[in-house]
Amino acid sequence: MSALLLGSVAYAQVYVPSPENLQAREEFRHHRLGIFLHWGIYATYAQGEWYLQTAGLNKDEYAVAAESFNPVKFDARAWARAFKGAGAGYVTLTSRHHDGFSMFKSTASGYNIVDATPFGRDIVDELAKACAEEGLDYHLYYSLVDWYREDYPLGETGHQTGRRGDRQDYNHYFDFMKTQVGELIDQYPNLAALWFDGVWDQDVHPGFDWRLPELYAYIHGLKPALLIGNNHHRMPFEGEDFQMFERDLPGENTAGYSAGQGISSLPLEMCQTMNSSWGYRIADPWYKSVKELVQLLVRAAAKNSNLLLNIGPMPNGELPHPALDRLAGIGAWMRGHSLSVDGTTSTTIPEQAWGVTTQNAEALFLHVLSPETLPVRDGVCRLVVPLPADMKPARKDAVSLLSGEKLKYEISKDGFLTVILLQSSVEDIDTVISIRR
């Protein structure tokens, strides 16, 4: 078993990111909204991306879905336009999920969308080109777990899929993954990041060697600027370029995935679903409102984090209508307020009962997310916030709404700013007050 669990190559290094990589990190930080897409042959079953596991299906019977996967209504350009219209800066697509099916042309396995489906087209390639046309950065998710291949060592999941378990060979599987990752980098020139998932599957085997430093060095050797992230729910490993949080903002653990996970100095990203599922599930109508999603984006930015917002496309190639509705609503808000989230960072002001704060080089932004907490008298709200020592409005007209409406304010001797806000000026989703430096 030790030969199975421990890689044959001892690999140690200190990762020094290239100048191109550091620049890519800053560009990644600037785009506070990303779109996550969980799409594969599991969409055919309309039961979510884990259906092979949750239904206890035989992998070969499950794979028959590839023969009927024909998303004839897929329009990469329409998708990219919808994402751009929502104010997103990048897109992350599942190139291969835990079921082992690849959504791209691969010489390493015929179990892919070009060779195994009647559709016969490379989804990853078409969306890559559409994103490039719309000026969207392009990222790809890649699962380290495989419930289909016999050489992937049995871990926590995938025990009921009909795998015999007599050909487990991680070194062989690693070479397969390395080949596919190389294909992703070579075939899609505008690929900006790789989003790995699945380290948690081998937690049942303490000491399991994923050979990640070797994989990361291989990736950075091929493309130094490419960003690497891994959804392992721990502090970043050597060679990773951004830190991710699943279903929770940095520093929170309501979903149960981030217990003990600290916050690094790397760029941060939290991923969340629009409804309840990652992959398309027909019995999941619980879409979050536009207000909930925008406020989540704002709270993410206030914690120095991006929001990677997930959609599960339908098997016919369309995005669900509720998802398109949310994208349009987010875009309507972003067109008047993106200045207060894109390119901003957190501040030293702690979260207040009324909301959160962000800042850029020109201004401090107060996001009033819960106006009901503000005292109101004669139709006037008074918002009080402790100002940082270096943040004093320089002019009488320095405080305003993003719409341009000037606001009256007072500054106390002890550094508290009081903003006078008409109740009629309060917005439903987020009233953003700009304080120019």
Image: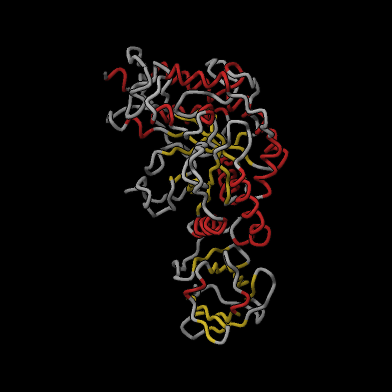
The residue located at (67%, 57%) in the rendering is 332
Relative image position of residue 174 (x, y in whole percent): 43, 21
**Relative side of 123 to 133, left or right:** left
Q: Residue at x 56, y 87 (%)?
A: 378
Whether residue 346 is visible to the viewer of this picture, yes or no, is yes
Q: Is residue 134 above or below residue 377?
A: above
In terms of depth relative to the viewer, which is nearer, 95 or 7?
95
Residue at 47% from the left image edge and 31% from the top image edge: 216
168 or 37, nearer to the observer: 37
Q: Residue furthest top?
A: 166
Q: Residue furthest right?
A: 133
Q: Residue furthest front?
A: 283
- Image quadrant of residue 205? top left
* Quadrant for the N terminus in the image: top left
- Which residue shows up at 63% across the image and 28% down it? 71
Q: Position of residue 143 (x, y in %)?
A: 46, 30
